[in-house]
Image (tube, rainbow, N blue to C red):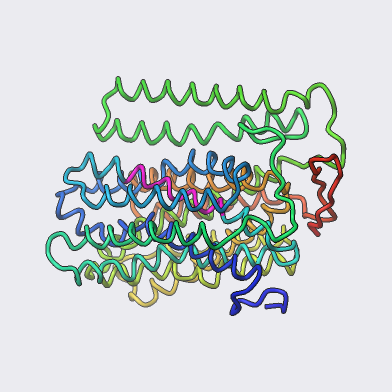
């Protein structure tokens, strides 16, 4: 690491980085506290395989709209207040899940816990404010990688913690413990950080309610890119009907609500962006929306697959190799464990080398990794299956780091909303991949992700390398140039 960014310090901007990745770590620990304990939950509630898979999908569903909403809030209110509020609220959803006594309550509270997954978006804006472009990829990688490790930490510790608590309710106490941690840290974070370095301006969107675009073509592209966010929720609704958890009348009502929400989104998009049809946006203030779309697709593949795999991997190892729950959780944690080095590595590679080529190479490694995982069966040596899983994980999370090394360089005042859009696509990917998983074998599931990676590589060929400066306008009309080269 350069002298400008020394990890083992706790002053200045590094203090903000450490406090913020820890907030993300806790949010991820809460978000995936169920995965390593799913065998116990399955036994207590006598769940079918389909009911287990539905819980996994529900866990990532609400995060889709939540990341869009949180992105808007963080651009308007600032990261400090929004992150603290998110951790505070999610702690109570966590307590509700821990005391659930039937499958319906379990499903509803798991769905609500998806809200905490939106925390990632907040830190992207915070880190983008505190670090210059030459270090932002590495800083975002450390934030994302060490924060993502929260899911691995949960997988490694919660089964043991449940055994330590003991009894039939050990898993409940273990999950509730993560809620207590989130509640305490909400206060710590609020009183320990500031939104920008002293003397810096926190740029806010000119209008709220929808993402600003800078050309008529980008406006229609934006509407098109919003559609899959609602489609993914419709897909989840359809799946719940197939499992007879929703009846057709309720499902049709939800389809209508989703359609109205999309129409409402179109209304706000028109309200915020109608000016681009009447007057051309000055050249210095434009950005290319295709950057957002391509990064969203790349994150759909990378983070979507990570969420899906983290959710199913403990049971995959348990059922494939016939090992115990604690052992399976520890081994499956290797996938998320790689976040400690892989996300920062992806960000560092992107900072130091060609950002577009870096993403292409990492997506290629991701695809090859999942293809190899599709060959794993009970005949493999367990150590080899774990090794392949960890190598694949490196490319998955390094690709995520490369994506978010570029996100803060698109348009500073819109970073929260852009991160929200890109991050939401990660959850769309999780819903899509987990829905595929509910129909096919784990081997076919891994192969489907490998094929998706090929599509992501084709799209990444059309990325523009960030260079030069982007402009932001101060309230007094002064134009401020921000280096992105």
- Identify the residue at horizontal 77%, vertical 34% (top origin): 214
The image shows residue 363 at horizontal and vertical percentages of 60, 59
Q: Name the one closer to the observer, 207 or 224.
A: 207
Q: Is residue 5 left or right of residue 31?
A: right
Secondary structure predominantly adopted by residues drawn in magenta = helix
- Splitting the image into 4 quarters, where does residue 399 fall? bottom right
Residue 262 x %, y %: 53, 26
Residue at the location (41% across, 42% down)? 61
| Quadrant assignment for the C terminus | bottom right
Quadrant assignment, res 206: top right
Q: Quadrant of the N terminus?
A: bottom right
* Residue found at the far front of this picture: 191
Where does residue 407 sit, x and y in percent of width and height? 67, 52
Residue under the point 67% across and 63% down: 137
Q: Is 22 left, or right, of 109 in this rendering?
A: right
Q: Quadrant of residue 236?
A: top left
Q: Is residue 256 visible?
A: yes
Part of the protein shown in magenta: 110-122
Badge count? 0
Residue at 71% over, 51% down: 461
Residue 370 vs 93, above or below: the answer is below
- Residue 371, visible in the rendered structure: no
- Which one is in front, 296 or 270? 270
Residue 196 sits inside the magenta stretch: no
Above or below, comparing residue 402 to residue 2 in the picture = above
Residue 118 magenta: yes
- Horizontal and vertical percent position of residue 359: 66, 59
Q: Residue furthest left?
A: 167
From the viewer's side, name the closer residue of 448 and 151: 151
């Amino acid at each position: 690491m350069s002298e400008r960014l020394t990890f083992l310090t706790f002053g200045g901007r590094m203090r903000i980085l450490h406090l913020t990745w820890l907030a993300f770590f806790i949010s991820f620990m809460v978000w995936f506290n169920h995965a390593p304990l799913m065998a116990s939950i399955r036994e207590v509630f006598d769940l079918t395989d389909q009911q287990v898979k539905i819980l996994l999908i529900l866990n990532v569903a609400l995060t889709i709209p939540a990341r869009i909403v949180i992105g808007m809030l963080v651009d308007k209110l600032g990261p400090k207040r929004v992150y603290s509020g998110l951790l505070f609220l999610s702690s109570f959803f966590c307590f509700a899940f821990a005391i659930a006594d039937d499958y319906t309550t379990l499903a509803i509270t798991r769905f609500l816990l998806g809200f905490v997954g939106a925390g990632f978006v907040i830190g992207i804006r915070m880190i983008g404010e505190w670090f210059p472009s030459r270090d932002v990829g590495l800083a975002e990688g450390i934030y994302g990688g060490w924060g993502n490790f929260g899911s691995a930490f949960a997988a490694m510790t919660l089964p043991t913690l449940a055994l330590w608590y003991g009894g039939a309710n050990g898993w409940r106490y273990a999950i509730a413990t993560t809620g207590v941690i989130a509640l305490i840290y909400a206060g710590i974070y609020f009183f320990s950080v500031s939104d920008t370095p002293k003397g810096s301006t926190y740029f806010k969107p000119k209008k709220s309610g929808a993402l600003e675009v800078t050309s008529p073509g980008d406006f229609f592209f934006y509407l098109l890119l919003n559609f899959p966010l609602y489609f993914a929720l419709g897909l989840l609704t359809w799946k719940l009907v197939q499992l007879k958890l929703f009846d057709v009348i309720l499902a049709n009502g939800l389809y209508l609500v989703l359609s109205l929400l999309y129409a409402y989104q179109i209304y706000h998009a028109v309200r915020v962006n109608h000016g681009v049809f009447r007057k051309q946006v000055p050249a210095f203030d434009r950005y290319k929306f295709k950057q957002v779309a391509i990064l969203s697709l790349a994150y759909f593949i990378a983070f979507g697959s990570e969420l899906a795999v983290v959710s199913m991997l403990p049971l995959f190892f348990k059922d494939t190799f016939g090992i115990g729950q604690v052992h399976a959780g520890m081994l499956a944690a290797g996938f998320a464990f790689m976040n400690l080095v892989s996300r920062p590595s992806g960000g560092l590679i992107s900072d130091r080398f060609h950002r577009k080529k870096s993403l292409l190479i990492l997506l290629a490694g991701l695809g090859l990794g999942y293809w190899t995982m599709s060959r794993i069966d009970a005949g493999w040596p367990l150590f080899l299956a774990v090794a392949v899983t960890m190598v694949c994980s490196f490319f998955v999370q390094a690709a995520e780091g490369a994506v978010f090394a570029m996100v803060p360089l698109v348009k500073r005042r819109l970073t929260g909303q852009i991160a929200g859009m890109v991050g939401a696509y990660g959850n769309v990917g999780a819903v899509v991949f987990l829905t595929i998983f509910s129909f096919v074998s784990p081997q076919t599931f891994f192969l489907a992700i490998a094929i998706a990676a090929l599509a992501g590589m084709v799209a990444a060929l059309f990325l523009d390398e960030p260079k030069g400066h982007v402009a932001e306008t101060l309230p007094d009309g002064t134009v401020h140039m921000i280096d992105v080269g």
